[in-house]
Amino acid sequence: MTQLVGHSSAIQRSSNFFVTLLQRYLPDPFLFAVILTFAVFLLVMPITGQGPMQVVDAWASGFWGLLTFSMQMALVVVTGHAMASAPAFKSKLAILAGIAKTPGQAIILVTVVSALACWINWGFGLVVGAIFAREIAGRVRNVDYRLLIASAYSGFLFWHAGLSGSIPLALASGSNLQAVTNGAVTAPIPTSVTLFSTMNFAILAVMFVTIPLLNRLMHPAPNQTVTIDPALLEKPAEKVIDKTNMTPAERLENSRLVSLLLGVMGFAYIIYYFIQNGFALNLNIVNFIFLFTAVLLHGTPRSLLNAVTQGARSCAGILLQFPFYAGIMGMMTAAGAGGMSLAGAISELFISISNETTFPLFTFLSAGIVNFFVPSGGGQWAVQAPIMMPAGEVLGVAPAKTAMAIAWGDAWTNMIQPFWALPALAVAGLGAKDVMGYCIMALLGSGIIISLGLLLF
């Protein structure tokens, strides 16, 4: 027991150090994106041989490349908030939240629920984890709210090794594989050797046990715990309308029949979708489910509109920052006269120091670095697959293992990349500096586990 307490204190001291450091020096996520923009701009020119205006052109050309994705992510926040704010949904969530009685139990429960949700679908997990953390914060006394939200976000580590992982699903689909992998992969690779491989399951199993425990051990001492007033988490009371004096328009806005018919229509399609496609979740169907669940649970169009209005206030960061990350991606992937891009140069550097044993590890590390500047699974695959997949083939590394190393690297550094944290932070009402100190500890812990998995299997 003494040894465990000492270990816990060491983890607490480490997490407190990172929390204090990032509280002081981590700027607002928008300024973080601006600093990354300047840093990439300065690095691209000497490494790729491009001139300033060529780099600016690549930045501007990529700037609007994430418009569809930005809208999808904004809707994740809005529709998720609308669904979660419905009294019927909150009551069910409260039952699950009631399992946790102490701060430690609350941290573990939030991490487990978020990890499972992200493994099923990353968009679903991002918003549900944060919503569940908010619910628990209002019920469990003396739990640190910052760590609670960070624990919800740590579940995002599991997404690329889960059912919605874009890289293993791209391999399984077989779409344009030969071109994307520069000829290294010519036939589809089934998920049985990627998502459902022994290596992947081993990494997932160890992380599923250790990450919740690590988060639990980071909980601050009582005198350093930051809590939130449960009243701040409550939805403002809706104005009561006198139904006897309603105008025809108000009667329509408060009609349960309208919401019922609309909800039935929406769920008819949802059922049809799953019959036709199986359990193939993507952002569009997740948002569709969130929205029409909210339609039915709120009962009237007016109640839904009020909830959507509240949720839309949390989307400012997504709308402002995602175009800047798209611009960064444009600079990272733009090749100079010699055909080399900055992302490609990073990948080539790690290949040059690799052998058959260490290649998966260095692929993972290079993917983690590239992900910091190209925070998109599909974008990262397009950048690294043409370089890392042929290199792995030459070194005798199985294509499935190389691909999963890229996938794990893409998920790994999301812990310190505010890009993906924005939806969860919007739901929680926190800033990146409030949670990133704890996320660094999750980054370090998961990095050790993933690295050992890639070396041992």
Image (cartoon, helix red, strand yellow):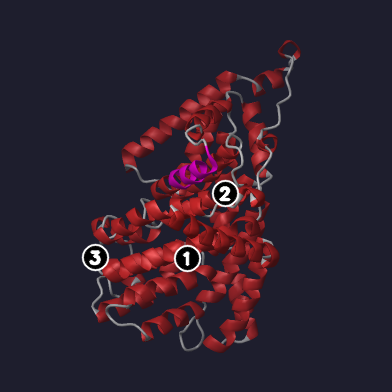
Q: CA distance from mark 2 to mark 1?
A: 18 Å
Q: To which residue does mark 2 refer?
A: 149
Which residue is labeled 1 in the image? 444
Tell me if I can see residue 49 in this picture. no
- Residue drawn at x 38%, y 38% is 273
* Residue 5 x/y as whole percent: 48, 55
Mark 2 and mark 1 in contact? Answer it, CB < 8 Å.
Answer: no
Q: Position of residue 334 (x, y in %)?
A: 52, 78
Nearer the observer: mark 3 or 2; the answer is: 2
Disc 3: which residue: 187
* For marks 1 and 3 on the same chain, the one whose residue lies earlier in the sequence: 3
Q: Judge by depth and name the residue closer to the eye, 12 or 158.
A: 12
Q: Secondary structure at mark 1?
A: helix
**Quadrant into which the C terminus falls:** bottom left
In this rendering, the label closer to the viewer, 1 or 3: 1
**Is the residue under label 2 in contact with that under label 3 (CB below 8 Å)?**
no
| Mark number, residue 78 | none
**Residue 233 image point, x, y percent:** 66, 37
Give the amino acid type for the residue marked by disc 2 in the picture. Answer: Ile
Residue 21, image x, y percentages? 65, 66
First reached walking from the N terminus: tag 2 or tag 1: 2
Q: Residue at x 51, y 37 (%)?
A: 290
- Disc 1 to disc 3, C-alpha distance: 35 Å
**Magenta span dominant secondary structure:** helix
Q: Residue furthest top?
A: 244
Name the quadrant containing residue 434.
Answer: bottom right
Would residue 110 be counted in the magenta stretch? yes
What amino acid is labelled 1 in the image? Leu
Regarding mark 3 in the picture, which secondary structure is present there?
loop
| Residues rendered magenta in the picture | 102-113
Q: Is residue 268 above or below residue 202?
A: above
How many marks do you count on the picture?
Answer: 3
